Amino acid sequence: MAEAGRRTQEADIVIVGAGPSGIFTALALAEAGARKRIVLVDEGLSVEERRCPKAVTGRCMGCEPCRITTGFSGAGAFSDGKLSLSAEVGGDLPDLIGYDEAQRAIREVDGIYLSFGADEHVEGAGVDEEVKEIRRRAIRAGLKLVDCPIRHLGTERAQAIYARIEARLREVGVDLHLRTACRDIVVEGGRCAGVVLEGPDGAAELRAERVVIAAGRRGADWLEKLCDAHGIRHEPGVVDIGVRVELRNEIMERVNNVLYESKLIGYPNPFRDKVRTFCQNPGGFVSQENYAGGLAVVNGHSYKNRKSANTNLAILCSHRFTEPFDQPIAYARKIGELANMLGAGRLLVQRFGDIQDGKRTWAHELERSNVRPTLPDAVAGDVTNALPYRTMTSIINFMLAVDEAIPGFAAGETLLYAPELKFYSNRVALGAGFECSLPGLHCLGDASGWTRGLMMASVMGHLMGKWLAER
């Protein structure tokens, strides 16, 4: 029963979250000709309305929700728009559905992106000898190179592609409820029977046969709380904490030209935690994202036609906690809040040489460096005051190893921004059709803990939509 004063509506399928997973669920359902009322809910704006005011004001305005992380197409498309074409990267979905099925689905989803205007060029294809040389250097440095073909959409082209997909969904009758937040799910008779929404017209209860939650990294914390409240089986997974590195294109030129994105993995001493590179942006720009509660985190993106003199990429250190602690997302958030406190609400940036010298970085030192920050409102300071000793030590030793494979990577002027956090540590137990332990409820994408990135999140949604269409 709906609470007093709350409107009740009906649908067949409700999808919470209009990021890649949610979009591709709706698209697969619509293209299969499913005669269902499909409602796609997101607390953000349409693609056309998603404009960060910082481009005009020169500083973050603290939009709530953040226009970079929230809205139709989610956070991934507005960061860089890279489609990884190998099932070896992008999370653990192959463990759930099988490697061959994941690779087959990647080909299908890649074809859909092409049909909506993605660039036909694939980075890292047809350069086997050059890749071998980079791999030899990585092996000598004790690192593993994962060479993954990439289709680079570019930030601006990704927006155009998702605008076409949004128009297509509206054309085929998918009901988009934007500026609308999901506050809870409705449980009746031991199954999920709908969701509780809050939008411009107030609160409403939307009843549905099936509920699909595809809340993205921004919604991982919310989904974890939802699982706890309703007894949905899940377990804490790995949390990634790190920095965004920025250095001159000249240092990364060979890797950029051959692979576009080098995915390097190491297990540096003394802790042997997994450390990896992620989201490399040649000629790109460092950016800020805001999460719920005003948490500012660093990210990066690159355009097809607009380039900087720098390359940026994330270095992430993975942490897996054991009992009695079971709140890795909250742990990472506290680290982010501490970094924000030290930066007076803004992101911190420090030169690698200053870290080695045990000193903070000052603004005047950045002004005379070869590497000029592409995020000019970052605060020069000391990231080691915010990141834990274990994390920072692993990152420093990993960077020194990468320097052996890519000379100049760990130069004194290389910039480190903090905090870079990835909120996808909550791993939801899923069965056939990505159904949770609560019947009628399905979880997808980065929030589910099974994917990490644009392509795999899209694949999970594509498979979800096909599964629902068959029923």
Image (cartoon, rainbow, N blue to C red):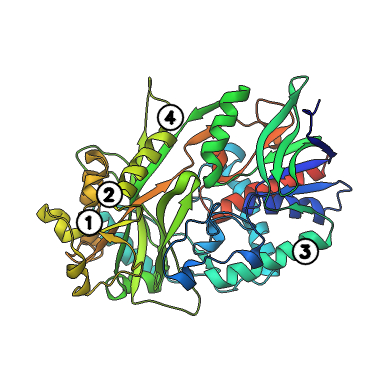
Give percent across and percent down for residue 463: 69, 46
How far is the residue under mark 2 from the one under mark 1?
Answer: 8 Å
How far is the residue under mark 3 from the one under mark 2?
Answer: 45 Å
**Which of the 4 quarters of the picture holds residue 10?**
top right
Asked if the residue under mark 1 is in contact with the one under mark 2, i.e. CB atoms within 8 Å, the reply is: yes
Identify which residue, 438 or 381, lies in the foreground.
Answer: 381
Q: Which residue is mark 4?
A: 327
Q: Specify the quadrant that holds the C terminus.
A: top right
Label located before the other in sequence (3 or 1)? 3
Seen in the picture, residue 432 relative to 315 is either above or below; the reply is: above
Left or right of residue 33: residue 292:
left
**Which of the 4 quarters of the picture holds residue 160?**
bottom right
Is disc 4 placed on a helix, strand or loop? loop
- Residue drawn at x 10%, y 55% is 357
Identify which residue, 364 or 96, lies in the foreground.
Answer: 364
Give percent across and percent down for residue 113: 65, 64
Q: Which residue is mark 1?
A: 381
Which numbered disc, 2 or 4, marks the residue closer to the eye? 2
Q: Is residue 26 visible?
A: yes
Amino acid type, label 3 = Arg
Q: Which residue is mark 2?
A: 342
Which numbered disc, 3 or 2, marks the residue closer to the eye? 2
Give percent across and percent down for residue 404: 20, 60
Amino acid type, label 1 = Gly
Q: Which residue is mark 3?
A: 168
Is disc 2 placed on a helix, strand or loop? helix
- Residue drawn at x 45%, y 33% is 237
Asked if the residue under mark 4 is in contact with the one under mark 2, i.e. CB atoms within 8 Å, the reply is: no
